Amino acid sequence: MVENFLKFFNDNNIPKSADANPLNILIDDAIKAGWNNNGLPPDRVSTENGAILTNSERYSLMIDPQLQGIVWIKRTYGDALKVTRLSNKNMVKVVEFAVESGDKVFIENMGNDVDAVIQPVYSRQVIKKGKARYIKMGDKMLNLSPDFTLFMHTKLQNPHYPPEIQAECTLINFTVTESGLEDQLLAIVVQKERPDLAALDEEIIMQMNGFKIKLSELEKGLLKQLNEAEGDLTENIVLIESLEESKKTSTEI
């Protein structure tokens, strides 16, 4: 995906850095580390999928036969995520409540057919009245919360959805790639043959990811303090302590 983006720049002679990487604009190491801690595989394709899902304006429809994406989403949002299915008799009520309250809804295990009742939601058929925004779902006019988010998921490897769904949603393919499968199989072999090394490797990765997240937090806090600082910076004890802590964490990483 990113390769096609860079090819478009090269073909049209659009100026860019030699090592241009659109992913660096969408996410940083701390965000990626948090995703990996929550179960998203660290391979390039999975990282690109995560960046698309979290930055897309449209609601996402995940093609995820190995359930890697669904594990990541559920761990990331925890109890804040309302999980339902099209076959659930309360599905409509769950979506209606979430639209107005600003909850995040995950509709899992969808087939090739999508219930027409949620079509105004996933297609974002927003009705504006002044500053308020509404979505008409059935015979109800729902006040759309800006915090509302919809995730849809299918385990089908090659689903056949109508063109309008593909145009109105962001289809993201979480199917395991060959390189990703090699890494996962290698990890399984190591876990079977040397469970002690596998546990140590997992502990080290979690620790390194934690350092990256902490360093990012310290950098943001330091920039905030620098922006708000008044007077002589050398006398700002809190700022100096934050700088020292950032240097210490950076050295550890």
Image (cartoon, rainbow, N blue to C red):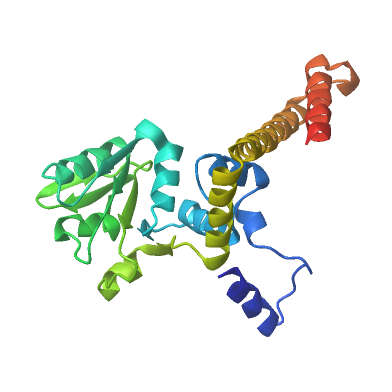
Seen at 38% across and 52% down, the residue is 67
Q: Is residue 29 left or right of residue 167?
A: right
Q: Is residue 94 depicted above or below 157 in this figure?
A: above
Seen at 47% across and 62% down, the residue is 176
Q: Is residue 185 depicted above or below 194 in this figure?
A: below
Q: Is residue 210 visible?
A: yes
- Residue 227 x %, y %: 75, 31
- Relative to the observer, which residue lies in front, 29 or 252? 252
Q: Is residue 195 left or right of residue 143?
A: right
For the C terminus, the image quarter is: top right
In the rendered image, the residue lying farthest to the bottom is 11
Q: Quadrant of residue 98?
A: top left
- Residue 72 x %, y %: 45, 45
- Count every numbered label the image shows and give the total: 0
Q: Is residue 45 visible?
A: no
Q: Quadrant of residue 117?
A: bottom left
- Residue 228 x %, y %: 73, 27
Q: Quadrant of residue 184?
A: bottom right
